[in-house]
Image (cartoon, rainbow, N blue to C red):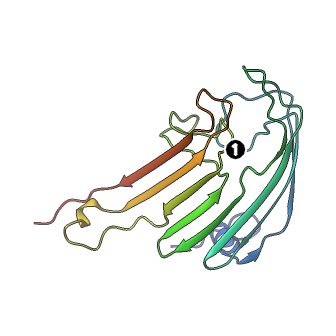
Amino acid sequence: MEDRKVGWGHDLLGTTLERESRTGFSPLRATIGLSDNRVNVRAFGSKPRAVFQPGVVTSWMNDRFAARISLSTLNGVKSDWKGRKDEGLTVDGSYLAARLGNWSGSVGKIDRWWGPGWDGSLIMSTNARPIPAVSLDRRVPEPFESKWLSWIGPWSFHSFIGRLEKERHVPKPFLWGMRVEFAPTPVKG
């Protein structure tokens, strides 16, 4: 199989893997979001949530821990149907994570996209801002080594628990989500 080079003779996959596996601090990145139209239904991609949304992002990673700090301000946000404005400093996208074997735990405000669609999700999407949550995830979907459970095939597990805002019928309720995925394999015999 031949090496596929993209652009100026660079190996795109190799460059991406090398960049994503680098330990230490990432460069500080500044962002500016401008919009004259509020998007009610969001898809994949980075669309500003306000008329003017400046921010800064940096991250750090080593073999066991990772952290990301993402600070931005929302300016010129339109009122929602209850007349509330969600303006000011946000830490959306920030987290602190730790790895233990094939599991990782994190605390932070991370976007989650759970559902079958590319243009929309009926379960969880990025339409609402992320909630502060604690999560537990299986990193690599490998099958069980036990002969009794190996038929389940590769499996993964994702779970989080977070607290919603107080402007609800029940103030500050908890939201718990859990997702288990597996791909059964035929049993030999």
Pointer 1 residue: 45
Q: Residue at x 67, y 51 (%)?
A: 109
Q: How many numbered discs sit on the rendered protein?
A: 1
Q: Is residue 180 visible?
A: yes
Residue 130: quadrant of the picture: top right
> Which quarter shows the C terminus?
bottom left
Q: Is residue 11 visible?
A: no
In the image, residue 69 lies at what x, y percent?
Answer: 77, 60
Q: Residue flagged by tag 1: what amino acid is it?
A: Gly
Q: Residue at x 39, y 53 (%)?
A: 181
* Above-or-below relation of 189 to 171: below
- The residue lying toward the viewer, choosing from 47 and 103, is 103
In the picture, measured across the screen, residue 180 lies left or right of residue 115, that is: left
- The residue lying toward the viewer, choosing from 38 and 133, is 133
* Above-or-below relation of 38 to 136: above
Q: At numbered mark 1, what does the secondary structure look like: helix, strand or loop?
A: loop
- The residue lying toward the viewer, choosing from 33 and 137, is 137
